[in-house]
Amino acid sequence: QVQLVESGGGLVQAGGSLRLSCAASGNIFSIKHMGWYRQAPGKQRDLVAFITIGGATNYPDSVKGRFTISRDNAKNTIYLQMNNLKPEDSAVYYCNFAPASRYDSWGQGTQVTVSS
C-alpha cells in the first residue's frame, strides 16, 4: 500500500507563503493523477489543486492564481506552493490520488494556519 506523508505546514500571517511537500513511498506519480486537498474544522474535504500524469494542472477559483501544484517524479514528491495566504485557507492539507476513492487511505496531513 502506498504511503503519502505531508509536511511543510505551519503558522503564517495573511499575505504570507508556505510550500507543502508530499512524499510517496513508491513511484506512483507517473501513473496516478494527484491532488492536494484541505479540510477545515466542521467542513468537508475539498480538492484545491490537481495535477495529471502529463503535468496539466487545475485549481478551483478560490485558490487560482495563488496556489501552484508541481511534481518531481525522481523524488516521488509533489508540492503545493501557496502564496498570498488568507485566513480562510486555514485547514489541514492532504495529498492523495485525484480523484480519491473511498478505498484510498489518507495520511496525517499538515496543518496550515493563517492569522489575520
Image (tube, helix red, strand yellow):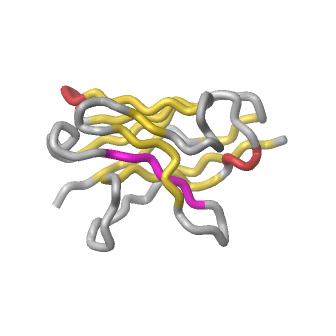
Q: Quadrant of the N terminus?
A: bottom left
In front here: 32 or 16?
Answer: 32
Residue 33 vs residue 92: left or right? Answer: left
Image label count: 0
Residue 103: percent from left, percent from top: 27, 72
Residue 50: percent from left, percent from top: 41, 42
Residue at the extreme right of the image, as rendered: 116
- Toward which corner of the image does residue 13 lie, by quadrant? top right
Is 63 rendered above or below residue 108? above
Name the residue located 30 percent from the left edge and 35 percent from the top edge: 77
Report the span colored magenta. 34-39
Residue 27: percent from left, percent from top: 15, 40
Magenta span: predominant SS is strand
- Toward which corner of the image does residue 52 lie, by quadrant? top left
Q: Quadrant of the C terminus?
A: top right
Residue 48 colored in magenta in the image = no
Residue 57: percent from left, percent from top: 40, 34
Residue 61 vs residue 24: left or right? Answer: right
Name the residue located 31 percent from the left edge and 53 percent from the top edge: 97
- Toward which corner of the image does residue 28 lie, by quadrant? top left
Residue 36 colored in magenta in the image = yes
Name the residue located 31 percent from the left edge and 67 percent from the top edge: 101
Is 63 rendered above or below residue 44? above
In front here: 27 or 5?
Answer: 27
In front here: 8 or 57?
Answer: 57
Residue 57 vs residue 33: left or right? Answer: right
Name the residue located 78 percent from the left edge and 35 percent from the top edge: 14
